[in-house]
Image (cartoon, helix red, strand yellow):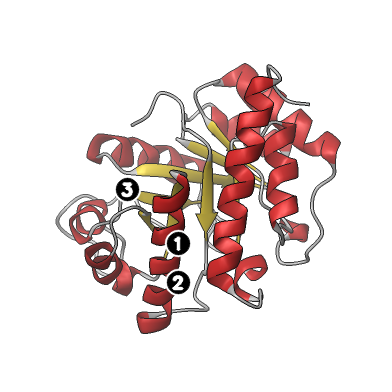
Amino acid sequence: MNNKISPFLVVNPKSYLYGAESLALAKAADDAAERTGLRIYFTCPFSDIRYIASETSHIIVTAQAMESLTPGRGMGHLLPEALFDAGARATFLNHAEHPMTMAELAKTITRARALGIETIACADSLAEGSAVAELRPDILLCEPTDLIGTGQTADDNYTISIAAKIRSIAPEIGIMIASGITTADDVYRVVRLGADGSGATSGILNAPDPGLRILEMAEAIVRAAAERDAAGGAA
């Protein structure tokens, strides 16, 4: 695991894509990662993990969820070892569409850490984000649930306050702001304000050219992070 996550982009098609369509977008993300040097996480259905991992070289193939299950009984559950063996090197946890109890989230982060799987843990408020930060996920996505998929981003004060609060708890955690993200300008703004990365679903999938949108977002994050660092921190 990294002591501090470098700037990143999460390409999250959820379950809108699978099979050949999922692979095609993954390859576009892989090309963007190679061209920009940015860390790009690509989520995909569990059935596509091995398929995509074998066909790409630069993206971090990411499971949509994981559990704290250990090898043995557990029919129908998500075994961390199986996800790792298939090629997943990161996983979302506690997404609004797949919530977890805090107890299960804590156990799953511990399991992931032991296996070398990065964790992107989700929270829907500053209060929940503060609690989740105590569990030390690799990345914390803190977004107002009611903005997901709306095209409306959280205001600047929200991004600034989230970044300040989470860094006061665990400065090594990568901070992700992604609610309502649609354009390269959106990801530029949240990273310039203090986030380490961003991501999108509809903002990428609904673009005229999804692959080009990924590249534009990746370039914007690289530029924003460089400008923020040169200025000595968030604007």
- Please give the name of the residue rendered at 27% of the width and 62% of the height, measured from the top-left corner: 53
Residue at left 78%, top 66%? 150
The correct choice, above or below, for 62 with respect to 126 in the image is below
Residue drawn at 45 percent across, 72 percent down: 25
Q: Which mark is residue 148?
A: none
Q: Which residue is mark 3?
A: 68
Q: Nearer the viewer, residue 102 or 192?
A: 192
Residue behind mark 2: 25
Quadrant where the C terminus is found in the figure: top right
The residue under label 1 is 29
Q: Tell me, yes or no, whether the two marked residues, 2 and 3, touch with CB atoms within 8 Å.
A: no
Instruction: Report crowding for label 1: few under 14, some 14 to 19, many 20 or more residues within 10 A (C-alpha).
Output: many
- Can residue 184 be seen in the rendering of this structure? yes
The x and y percentages for residue 1 are 33, 32
> Which numbered disc flags the more N-terminal residue, 1 or 3?
1
Q: How far, Cα to Cα, is label 1 from label 3?
A: 29 Å
> x, y percentage for residue 138?
45, 35
The mark nearer the N terminus, 2 or 3, is 2
